[in-house]
Amino acid sequence: MTDRIIDLEIKLLLEAVFEQFHYDFRGYSMASIKRRLRQALTHFRCETVSQLQGRVLHEADAFPQLLSYLTVQVSELFRDPTYFKALREQVLPHLRTYPSLKIWVAGCGDGEEVYSLAIMLREEGLEDRTLIYGTDVNPKALRKAEAGVYAVDRIPLFTRNHQLAGGKSSLSDYYTAAYGGAAFDKSLTRNVVFSDHSLVSDAVFAEMHLISCRNVLIYFDRQLQNRAVELMKESLIRRGFLGLGSRETLRFTEHAEAFTDFAKDVRIYQKRGDQ
């Protein structure tokens, strides 16, 4: 089968998903979508994308399974510790001057970044005045995020990240381990709202002081990247912060001029005061 036919099948599948389920992946990068669909084809034991499309449209439990492949949920607590250390040491001193704070974790997946921020804010004495929104398009991921239970064999990695990120306490203070899982303290999410929100199709979220959106834009094509960055720009207060992480940049987007570099190495930007 030629690449042209495969691309055509993928476009038809994504159009069918949008028309039937109202999830819009049509602006995702083709390279990323192809990689994910190859894994999905193996899972569904389909030889072609067209066969997969038939199952998604006619089998009730097929689309939720496909959604898990289309929305990659790969993260860890305090992933890229230098990013969280920069937030703790450089961004929080600015945010501390506000009487109340709103933080948005866009594309929160299974919630690891939300728990990381909640722990950091508690350690810095900012938890009580902060509301965190964790959003994602995958309802299964949001349910897992709300549960806050992760495989216990991931705890050594989480603990190491926490310390490298400047953690001021023991990570074990925040979870209870039992039966192969580590359940994080429910009190960490008392100021957290997990919600369905799409950077592809939904509107401005709220007036945020900090937006963290890492490992998301890399899956979008340029047009969709521009839309997502504009959405986040409009969601931030003046001089609010946008964290993208080391793998992504604003440099090639239409809205780069609305921000200044704040922590360049870890790609934390600050919205200009005149925007």
Image (cartoon, rainbow, N blue to C red):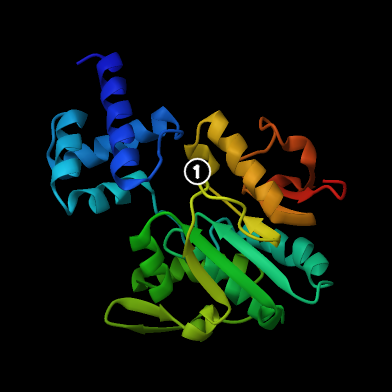
Q: Secondary structure at mark 1?
A: loop
The location of residue 45, given as percent across then percent down, is: 12, 39
Q: Nearer the viewer, residue 166 or 199?
A: 199
Q: Nearer the viewer, residue 186 or 192?
A: 192
Q: Which quarter shows the N terminus?
A: top left
Q: Is residue 12 above or below residue 123?
A: above
Q: Quadrant of residue 148?
A: bottom left
Instruction: Find disc 1 in the rendering and name its residue.
Output: 200
Q: Is residue 47 above or below residue 23?
A: above
* Residue extending furthest toward the right: 274
Q: Is residue 44 left or right of residue 246?
A: left
Q: Is residue 17 left or right of residue 59?
A: right
Residue visible at 66% across and 30% down?
252
Residue visible at 42% across and 54% down?
137
* Residue extending furthest toward the front: 19
Report whether residue 191 is seen. Answer: yes
The location of residue 46, given as percent across then percent down, is: 13, 35
